[in-house]
Amino acid sequence: MKTMVGTARVPCGSVNTFNKPPENSEVKSGSLCLIQQCGGITRKAHVFVRVYRSSFEHYAVICKDQKFSAQSGYMSLKNCTVCKCEDKDNQLRVTLNNFEGNGLIFECRTKLEVQDWIDALQPNRSISPLPLPIIPRTLLMPSLEEESESEEVQ
């Protein structure tokens, strides 16, 4: 028996009623410029970024080119803040919510792309896991008294 592995194709006329991407799907991908500042020196590195979102994870894979390699980077976007840089119109900053406040600065080719990238990178706060059911506490079971075997036989 043959097993088919691949992606399902959706007919052109079909409509996604929930207006959200399918599970574990790529939300956005494209070329960005990563800006690194170290010791007063600013360096730019061209990278390819893929953003993925599922019901449990939201992350970005940063590669040197469009191929995955051992030099690819992974960044969890679940608990981060994404905003437009104030001094540059075509730059955005992704800040991780940790004690240091580390972050990355990306530069888009045009000002119009910035909002699309912010929407893709920003964590979706409206999706939250379902609350766990509350298990009511019950009173302790009443203790049972044991009867001896000699009483039962009589």
Image (tube, rainbow, N blue to C red):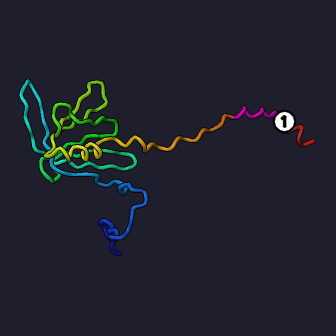
Q: Residue at the spot x=15%, y=46% of the render?
A: 110
Q: Residue at the spot x=37%, y=43% of the render?
A: 124
Q: Which amino acid does label 1 sit on?
A: Ser
Residue 142 in magenta stretch: yes
Image coords of residue 92 (percent x, y): 21, 37
Quadrant position of the N terminus in the picture: bottom left
Q: In this view, does 122 lie above or below 18?
A: above
Q: Please, which residue is most extreme toward the bottom here?
A: 1
- In this picture, which residue range is highlighted in magenta? 138-147
- Towards the viewer: 31 or 62: 31
Left or right, 91 with reference to 124: left
Q: Name the residue under label 1.
A: 148
Left or right, 41 with reference to 133: left
Q: What element carries label 1?
A: loop
Q: Residue at the spot x=23%, y=29% of the render?
A: 102
- Towards the viewer: 154 or 75: 75
Residue 73, picture quadrant: top left
- Towards the viewer: 50 or 116: 116
Q: Is residue 27 above or below residue 91?
A: below
- Crowd band around label 1 with a 10 angstrom C-alpha radius: few (<14), some (14–19), many (20+): few
Residue 13, picture quadrant: bottom left
Q: Main secondary structure of the magenta part?
A: loop
Whether residue 80 is visible: yes
